Image (tube, helix red, strand yellow):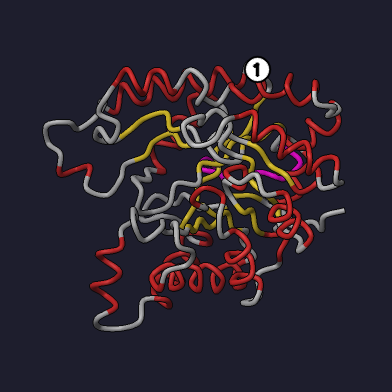
Amino acid sequence: MSEIATVTGSTAPEQLGRTLMHEHLMIGYGGWEADSLRPGSSREEMFSRCVDRIEEIKGLGISSLLDPCPNDLGRDVEFMAKVAQKTNFQIICATGLYKEAEGGTAYWKFRSGFAPPVEAMAELFVHELQEGIGETGIRAGIIKVATGHGGLSDYERWVFEAAALASVETGAPITTHTDNGLFGDEQQTFLTERGVPAHRIVIGHSCGSVDHDYHLGIAQRGSYLGFDRFGLEMLQPDTERVKALLRLLQAGFGNQLVVSHDSVWCWRGAPIPDPEMLKKMEETWNPTHFLTRIVPQLREGGATDVQIEALLVENPRRFFAGDAIP
């Protein structure tokens, strides 16, 4: 694909600049709207917070980000567009569906009692990639899919099958969620066996694993690895993420790594009921963390400025352009 759809129109790969490949302006887990006592912040408050976050990362030279929120996790592309317009910043949104345990599975499972849902899912993804999301005219620039702790469930196979069909038809890339960095190899095999080129796939949250052989296997088969949860210390210490990333750089796979934080800036409802706990998490789990705290650790570990800049600029550019990995 020579152009990339953003929430404010198309851009060219070479215009992305420094890009964070997995951040969330807003998340709403299914059922948030039922908690009428805790609706979360107002849209005005969320808008102000997101604008502030964007201005922070712009100050660090970031000019684009991917918000891969799937359709069933509180996605609001008009909100993204409003933030992008206010900040003159490039935001790429996604089409797709989340993992069975935490996504909008009830709708699709009910529907499956009448007809297999794969074709309907694929039709949805294709429409959102080519025509736009709902009546907004905003097109998705990527497909997002996810698996849970046990690998691909039957439901998740429907979603992955639909994603593969949509990707092959449109040429759109795919980014994934893995729990604890596991089963990315299974995701990769499933998608590539159905015609998706390996270099059009980011295996997300790969930094949740410290298994170097696992990382090498995915890289050697031609996909990108998302080291995209920096700062989320409650799931994996950053010291382990840094070590794993440095090992891949030393092994010659620096061209297949993208970075981010998977930070959530605003929540619909109150899935984390303790505001002090959330405040503590956000000391590191925020979109400035990689450049301000992780980059010095990478340099200390022997990474060059050229290698570090490739993680932020050249690799995202090449991935979205669909160019072959050198």
x, y (%) of residue 189? 64, 70
Q: Which quadrant holds the N terminus? A: bottom right
Q: Residue furthest bottom?
A: 115
Q: Is residue 144 depicted above or below 236 in this figure?
A: below
Q: Residue at x 84, y 26 (%)?
A: 305
Is residue 85 inside the magenta stretch? no
Q: Which residue is mark 1?
A: 292
Q: Give the residue type at disc 1.
A: Thr
Q: Is residue 23 depicted above or below 140 in this figure?
A: above
Q: For residue 275, which quarter of the picture? A: top left
Of 311 and 140, nearer the camera is 311
Magenta residues span 6-15
Is residue 8 inside the magenta stretch? yes
Q: Residue at x 32, y 17 (%)?
A: 276
Of 221 and 59, nearer the camera is 221
Q: What crowding class fits label 1: few (fewer than 14 Cα within 10 Å), some (14-19), or many (20 or more)?
A: few
Horizontal side, residue 61 vs residue 277: left or right: right
x, y (%) of residue 22? 55, 40
Secondary element at tag 1: helix
x, y (%) of residue 210? 65, 44
How many numbered marks does the figure carry?
1
Q: Is residue 141 depicted above or below 43 in this figure?
A: below
Q: Residue at x 79, y 60 (%)?
A: 220
x, y (%) of residue 255? 81, 46
Of 84 and 27, nearer the camera is 27
Of 13 and 146, nearer the camera is 146
Horizontal side, residue 305 vs residue 105: left or right: right
Q: Residue at x 80, y 20 (%)?
A: 300
